[in-house]
Amino acid sequence: MIMADSHIDRPLLQSMIQTSLLEKLGEIGFAKADPKLAYTGHDGTTTIIRCAHTEAESVRAGLALITHIGYKKVHLMPVFTSGTILKCKRALARASGKARYGHNS
Amino acid sequence: MLTDILDFDLGQLRRSPRFYGFDSFLQLGKDVTIHPAGKQKKLSGAGPQPGKPSIVFSSNTEELIRVVKKFDVVYSTIYDASPALLTRLNVAKRKALVNISDILGKEGADRAQMMHRISRFLEFCRSYRVEVVFASMAKDEFSIRGPQEIADIFVQLGVGREQIRYSYSIINDVSWAGSE
């Protein structure tokens, strides 16, 4: 879940999360984890990050250390970790109270 | 019961402590008192208050050693793993404080250096049997990190998840040092 003081659009979010994680994990750690934004919710406050399951813990640690995206203060809060994107989407739908879960954007 | 200490008015919070994974929040200055060690304390004239946990802070370890007994929690802002300080904390049964803002408020090499200092400090606290209180001391809601998120960071530095949860729970057990 992304908490920010204003809306952040997907391309900026993707590039900033990748830049921040690269800084936090280092080049070797980033290569092992290979984090990617797999899906972003329509409201822009939720996103699914896909990464190597062996490096999930270090990606979560890296996300917790992100305090800014550009000049905006953010808090990237991990709410659910799963082995499949589908389960994550279901969890997102449950969290936002929607019956349907979205498609990849 | 997991509790965090915040450094802003709790009325400004838009979400409940449960949202972040805590049971309650304490406000610095209102529910928890904080005092500088050394001469500044004498000037302000404010000491620990009954019923409220008190924190004393300084970057000078010798000053902290002198006032350990008067306060509940000791915050060495430079995380000096001094055997003299840790022995005093152990004997006086006082707690050390780790301020998460010291990590989140820094960037790059400064942050890495601070994480190293804190992990070494925690290692020494463990060997001297000194209990550690974790607090985010967040100045806004974006700086609050839940116990799970802090555990994600500190697991990488060799601290267990249970230890982190315990460190967030003991601020409720802290009694006023002046009542002894």
Image: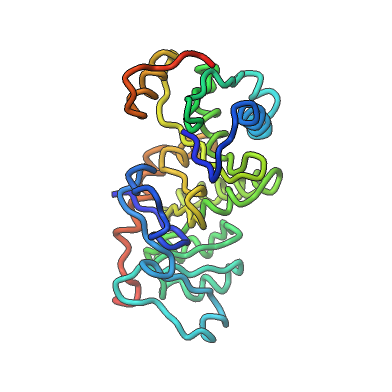
Is residue A41 depicted above or below B100 in this figure?
A: above
Q: Is residue B144 left or right of residue B60?
A: left
Question: Residue A93: percent from the left, percent from the top?
Answer: 36, 23
Question: Residue A43: percent from the left, percent from the top?
Answer: 47, 30
Q: Residue A2 or A29: which is nearer the viewer?
A: A2
Question: Residue B77: percent from the left, percent from the top?
Answer: 58, 61
Q: Is residue A25 visible?
A: no
Q: Is residue B42 visible?
A: yes
Q: Is residue B177 left or right of residue A71?
A: left
Is residue A78 depicted above or below A32 in this figure?
A: below
Q: Residue B92 or B177: which is nearer the viewer?
A: B177
Q: Residue at x 51, y 71 (%)?
A: B65
Q: How many marks?
A: 0
* Color encoding of the figure: rainbow
Q: Residue A85 or B44: which is nearer the viewer?
A: A85
Q: Is residue B124 left or right of residue A98?
A: right
Q: Residue at x 35, y 29 (%)?
A: A95
Q: Residue at x 35, y 77 (%)?
A: B49
Question: Residue B34: percent from the left, percent from the top?
Answer: 46, 70
Q: Residue at x 31, y 19 (%)?
A: A99
Quadrant for the C terminus of chain A in the image: top right
Is residue B56 depicted above or below B44 in this figure?
A: above
